[in-house]
Each structure stands twice: as C-alpha cells, then as structure tokens.
Image (tube, rainbow, N blue to C red):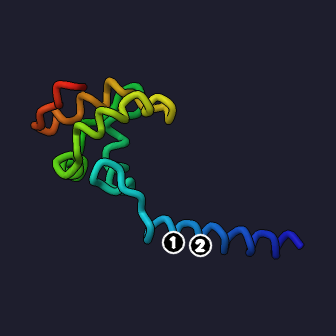
C-alpha cells in the first residue's frame, strides 16, 4: 500500500513540475523561473552579488512594475531593501518611484 502511495505521489510531483516548466508565469515582462536567478542575491543574511544571468533578467524586466511589487517581497521572506539594490549592482538605474 505504501509503495503504491509513493508511486502516485511521485507521478503527481512530476506532472506538477512539468506543467510549471511549460506554463511558466510572467511577472513584469520576465518569467518567474528567470527571476529565480536573482534569489541568491536578495536572500539570507549575507547575499551574494548578482550573477550575470540575474542582471540579464533585470535588463529585460519592467523595473517600474517590479517597484510596485516591492512590498510583497517580505511575504515570501525576501528583503525589499536588498531587492532594490540589485539594479544598481547590475549597472541599471532604479526608477524614481522606488
């Protein structure tokens, strides 16, 4: 019985992962999966510098749109202050509204 349950759960996880990859959500003109490139640069007590991949994502993103979402970052355990420093670290200008 437990082997069957494990098999069913494994198949469900694979289906969810496959669907998430094919129907990736878009936020502020970039895919959520792309934004994940920047997580190490805004999480933890001592975040790493943004990678080139993270900066490439930010170059494509609508930064004004991202600014509007800033207050929601804390809900996910991410620092809005650290997130707002990313564009500058990537050589981009932060919109004045931020």
- Figure quadrant of residue 92: top left
Q: Quadrant of residue 6?
A: bottom right
Instruction: Give percent across and percent down for residue 97.
Output: 22, 25
Tag 1 residue: 18
Horizontal placement of 39 versus 92: left or right?
right
User: Residue at point 30% right, 48% down?
Assistant: 28
Please indicate whether residue 18 sits to the left or right of residue 29 in the image.
Answer: right
Q: Contact (CB < 8 A) between labels 2 and 1?
A: yes
Q: Position of residue 75 (x, y in %)?
A: 51, 31
Q: CA distance from mark 2 to mark 1?
A: 5 Å
Looking at the rendered image, the quarter that the N terminus falls into is bottom right
Q: Which mark is residue 15?
A: 2
Residue placed most toward the observer, 42 or 66: 66
Query: Which numbered circle lies on residue 87?
Result: none
Residue drawn at (27%, 53%) of the image: 29
Residue 65, x across and y down, in percent: 28, 40
62 over 87 or under it: above or below: below
- Place residue 64 in its image quadrant: top left
User: In the image, residue 98 lies at what x, y percent?
Assistant: 24, 25
């Amino acid at each position: 019985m437990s082997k069957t349950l494990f098999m069913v759960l494994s198949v469900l996880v694979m289906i969810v992962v496959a669907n998430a990859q094919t129907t990736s959500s878009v936020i502020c003109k970039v895919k959520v999966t792309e934004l994940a490139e920047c997580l190490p640069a805004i999480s933890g007590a001592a975040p790493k510098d943004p990678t080139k991949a993270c900066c490439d994502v930010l170059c494509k993103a609508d930064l004004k749109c991202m600014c509007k979402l800033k207050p929601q970052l804390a809900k996910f355990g991410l620092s809005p202050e650290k997130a707002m420093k990313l564009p500058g670290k990537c050589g981009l200008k932060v919109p004045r509204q931020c």
